[in-house]
Image: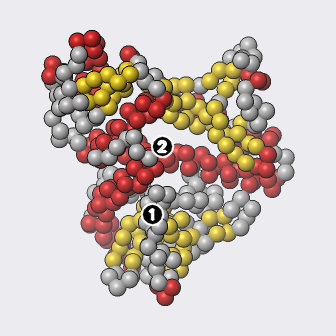
Amino acid sequence: MRLDQMPYHSMPTLAVLPFRQFGIGWSWQLRALKLFPDSLLAWKRYFYDNGQGHARGSSFSTFAEAMIAADAFNQTIAERIGIAVLDPVLQASVTLKVDKALTAARRIQDEEELMEREAIKRNAHLPRPAIRDLNLPSKMDSLREPLHEQLIRAPYLQVVAIARFNACLRRTGDMEWEEIGALTPKRSQICLREFTAKGFGLSAADHWGRTKAQIRALLLPRANQLLQLASVKQMLAEARMRGQRVLVCGGFVFWFEDDGQPRWVIKNTGGESNNEEGSTLWHEGTILSKNHGRIVVLPYIKENGERVQGHTKNAPHDGKALPRHRDQYVTLPFEILEGDLMIGLFGELHYE
């Protein structure tokens, strides 16, 4: 089909980013952040001219390859916004919205990657099956080697996608496997999520948002290990001597809780304030905590210039945050620490 006939072609493309594409196997597909009327943004499939006026999509076998292409395209975001939006005030607003959309999408991808990595690491002690011990029908013998390769990486898998043969396999016993059909987008998605969900004892077929909420809860003890490190203890003791109660470092917040049991606890940063470039963050703002939510939304500036006070909340699917008594509401300043003490979702403790 010609490029000018593709859906949403007339809507300006301001940025692109890789997203998982589920089909026969897993690939990375560029999606376009399109600008719609009233400054609304939405992710749509990205197409470009193949040189003859016809539309061509951008798919990559690895995330790294896709990000190279996306980074090259996104170097022109400012120019694209300037062409698409003539009003300087609206330009600033759209720029903030684009930054926020890119950051939110990257955060989800990073979180899911770290969850998968931790799931595999948690099961590293499991024995790996010998390829000869896998019990498959004789007509499926060609699937034995690619199945074995995946079980070497994650021996706990119950469903496996074999893209090379367009097949989906299911475990029926300890070493017994059966083919349940060709790969559909849904089956492919479940097989990919199996690496993460089943590694935590959960189902890849359940609601993905609620599954990730359960995984976050399971990872909390890992994050809390940070509080036992000598270097972190010293940092927090010095902060209390200066009268500080909220320290922000990377994706974590060290929060001093004084509700009858004075102690430091770990929370996550999240929400509108988390912008990769920090352009929406209002450093002089404060955090008003009306509940015991595990996520701290730092003070931020809306696209219209309005300054929003920081607050605490739970993530989607985590349930409602336990409220504080009105007498226990706290309004706290915060300090952002330089350096990368922790990485991503739960920390790698690499600096100790």
In this view, the mark in front (2 or 1): 1
* Pointers 2 and 1 in contact (C-beta within 8 Å): no
Q: Is residue 281 above or below residue 44?
A: below
Q: Is residue 81 above or below residue 316?
A: above
Q: Quadrant of residue 322?
A: bottom left
| Direction from residue 192 to residue 173 in the image, left or right | left
User: Of the residues shown, which amino acid type is indicated by label 2?
Assistant: Gln
Q: Quadrant of residue 236?
A: bottom left
User: Of the residues shown, which amino acid type is indicated by label 1?
Assistant: Gly
Label 1's element?
loop
Residue at image x 66%, y 64%?
301
| Direction from residue 102 to residue 289 in the image, left or right | left
Residue position for label 1: 319
Q: Nearer the viewer, residue 9 or 241?
A: 9
Q: CA distance from mark 2 to mark 1?
A: 22 Å
Q: Is residue 337 visible?
A: no
Question: In the rendering, at what x and y percent does residue 31 appear?
Answer: 61, 34
Residues packed near mark 2 inside 10 Å, few (<14), some (14 to 19) or many (20 plus): some
Label 2's element?
helix
